[in-house]
Image (tube, grey):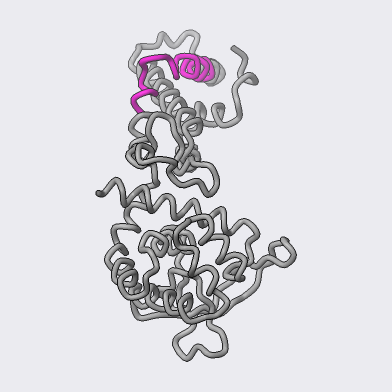
Amino acid sequence: MAMDALNPLTQSLAADAASLNRLKFQAGQATPAAIKETAKQFEALFMRELLKSLRDATMKSGLMDSPQGDLGTDLLDQQFAVQMAGQPGGLSEIIAKQLMQQMGLKDGTAANARPEGAAPASPAAATEPVNAPPAARSFVQQHAAAAQQVERSSGLPASYLLGQAGHESGWGQREINLPDGRSSHNLFGIKATGDWKGKVAEVTTTEYVDGVPHKTVARFRAYDSYADSFRDFAQLIGNSPRYAQARQQTDSVQRWARGLQEAGYATDPDYAAKLSRAINTTLQLQRAQG
């Protein structure tokens, strides 16, 4: 097996343990294919180090030893390691299974692998295993009480509130921060327009003009707590005439998301589809938690 037959990442793996960082990034893509390939390469690295240790433990005669010979032996070990990795029942299967569990995947299904805007089609579908990413589970658990309290006072479904907050904040991973690094607690991406009298966070964001993304600096509202963020979002939706039609669409995830997009809540042309997926993720998690 010639070295040029190996893909570049596999070559790097076999030759340099520092490429583990790249493997971690690849595994973080949260797709079964990426995880299986990563597991295979981890196994190849392990096998290569094992072969190297065995050779180091073997006494050398000294007659044929040379730097060139050592390099050739190391290259041969690389090829053997790659060839042995990924065999059925091998170490890579164990690694892949563990990684999938940690990434919130099951039976090779990618997280959130649902058609755009598709809600569970039947009660049976609602009982299927939840494959939401761990960040979404943690986010829903953290903010469930605040969302439920706002649902009681506003009538907006808690699942819709949680899904929208999760989508806007990347499930809490892309929060808007104040200049000193503290969180603005703004989970819904609500901007600080002229009538806002509270704290403000200025950040670079992406706005779409005629469907084309542009980077711009925008002012966003800042709150003292996440609960304040939920309450302010409900007040915005409940009091603004522009969202009157959306308020009448809470019986359908898709219609609610479309209503917000048509009212101009966000400039992303795919906002309704993305929001629908996030809300369906929340619905799955809530059903699983029972």
Q: Is residue 188 above or below residue 25?
A: below
List x then y, in percent, for residue 253.
48, 56
Which secondary structure dominates the residues rendered in magenta?
A: helix
Foreground residue among 268 and 215: 268
Magenta stretch: residue 76 in it? yes
The single residue placed furthest to the right in the displayed view is: 210
Q: Is residue 174 above or below residue 83?
A: below
Magenta stretch: residue 124 in it? no
List x then y, in percent, for residue 241.
55, 80
State which region is magenta. 74-95
Foreground residue among 167 and 252: 252
Taking the spot 59% from the left edge, 67% from the top edge, the residue there is 266
Taking the spot 59% from the left edge, 12% from the top edge, the residue there is 1
The answer to which quarter of the image holds residue 215 is: bottom right
The answer to which quarter of the image holds residue 202 is: bottom right
Taking the spot 35% from the left edge, 37% from the top edge, the residue there is 124
List x then y, in percent, for residue 10.
54, 27
The answer to which quarter of the image holds residue 60 is: top left
Can residue 268 be spotted in the picture?
yes
Foreground residue among 191 and 146: 146
Q: Is residue 57 left or right of residue 187?
A: left
